[in-house]
Image (spheres, grey):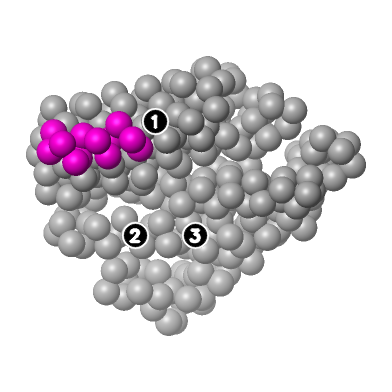
């Protein structure tokens, strides 16, 4: 089978598994995040050139414990502080390297923020919210690729990712914003803040989010590409046939999840000021 069809089939499989886990509910979401952290942390260590299996295991266990606590409903901020304090103590004591702490900042916390944005309406889980994020990330990647192929002339960051162009970024951003607008209109119109009249994601706030996700998702992609360049490797791993590693597929998602969470929090504070 050619690499093209391998990539297509495995891509469809990833989308199907992701959507299925989101639809199942909070525990499906937890399984999704545990899969990402279990695959992503070892790849992150590999990119940093550190082959410490025991330390990777500790990092995965700590991150998984935090994700489980968030799923059980423990306050995000307190679990986050506990995770950072424990990891920082380990670094200062010399028991683990700073890569463990960086791994939590890069991978664990964005996954926790994904759980956070899944409970945006009446503190109840609704798969429409994490699906919204994934649709925007997938749209940004797809639209940027198509726009770059059709109109790409000017390289965005040739020393890091030669295939990316300014035209691809601009086209991807505009079309992702439009995608966000219509997703909000048809799938999020019944979700309001506690005042009962302000939409959690109006068409226009969703449009802004689409722009932010596209821009910061691209930065996330470039961030991982920079790490790979520095490490001298093409892919972060080979766990996903035709796509490389976990970080290769979810690099944009980590940045996008943080943007969505903070944008939602800002909107919440404005509405409830």
Quick one: SS at disc 1? helix
Residue interval drawn in magenta? 84-95
Q: Which residue corresponds to the image point at 46% horizontal and 47% vertical from the top-left?
A: 253
Residue 15 pos. (x, y %): 49, 35
Question: In the image, is 252 to the left or to the right of 95?
Answer: right
Residue marked by disc 3 = 216
Residue marked by disc 1 = 82
Residue 14 pos. (x, y %): 44, 34
Q: Earlier in the sequence, mark 3 or mark 1?
A: 1
- Residue 1 visible to the viewer: no
Residue marked by disc 2 = 223
Q: Earlier in the sequence, mark 3 or mark 2?
A: 3
- Residue 172 visible to the viewer: yes
Quick one: SS at disc 3? helix
Question: In the image, is 224 to the left or to the right of 204?
Answer: left
Whether residue 88 appears in magenta in the rendering, the answer is yes
């Amino acid at each position: 089978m050619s690499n093209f069809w391998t990539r297509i089939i495995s891509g469809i499989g990833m989308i199907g598994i992701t959507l299925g886990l989101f639809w199942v509910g909070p525990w499906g979401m937890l399984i999704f995040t545990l899969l990402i952290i279990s695959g992503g942390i070892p790849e992150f260590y590999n990119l940093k050139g550190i082959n410490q299996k025991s330390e990777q295991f500790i990092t995965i266990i700590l991150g998984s414990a935090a994700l489980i606590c968030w799923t059980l409903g423990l306050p995000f901020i307190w679990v986050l502080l506990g995770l950072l304090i424990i990891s920082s103590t380990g670094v200062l004591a010399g028991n683990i390297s700073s890569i463990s702490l960086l791994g939590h900042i890069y991978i664990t916390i964005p996954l926790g923020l994904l759980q956070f944005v899944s409970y945006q309406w009446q503190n109840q889980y609704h798969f429409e919210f994490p699906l919204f994020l994934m649709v925007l990330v997938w749209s940004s990647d797809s639209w940027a690729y198509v726009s770059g192929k059709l109109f790409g002339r000017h390289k965005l960051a040739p020393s890091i990712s030669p295939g990316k162009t300014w035209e691809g970024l601009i086209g991807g951003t505009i079309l992702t914003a439009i995608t966000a607008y219509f997703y909000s209109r048809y799938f999020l119109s019944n979700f309001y803040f506690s005042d009962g009249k302000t939409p959690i994601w109006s068409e226009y706030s969703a449009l802004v989010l689409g722009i932010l996700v596209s821009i910061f998702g691209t930065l996330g992609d470039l961030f991982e590409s920079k790490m790979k360049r520095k490490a001298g490797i093409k892919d972060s791993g080979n766990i996903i046939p035709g796509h490389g590693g976990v970080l290769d597929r979810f690099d944009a998602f980590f940045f996008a999840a943080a943007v969505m969470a903070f944008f939602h929090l800002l909107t919440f504070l404005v509405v409830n000021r």
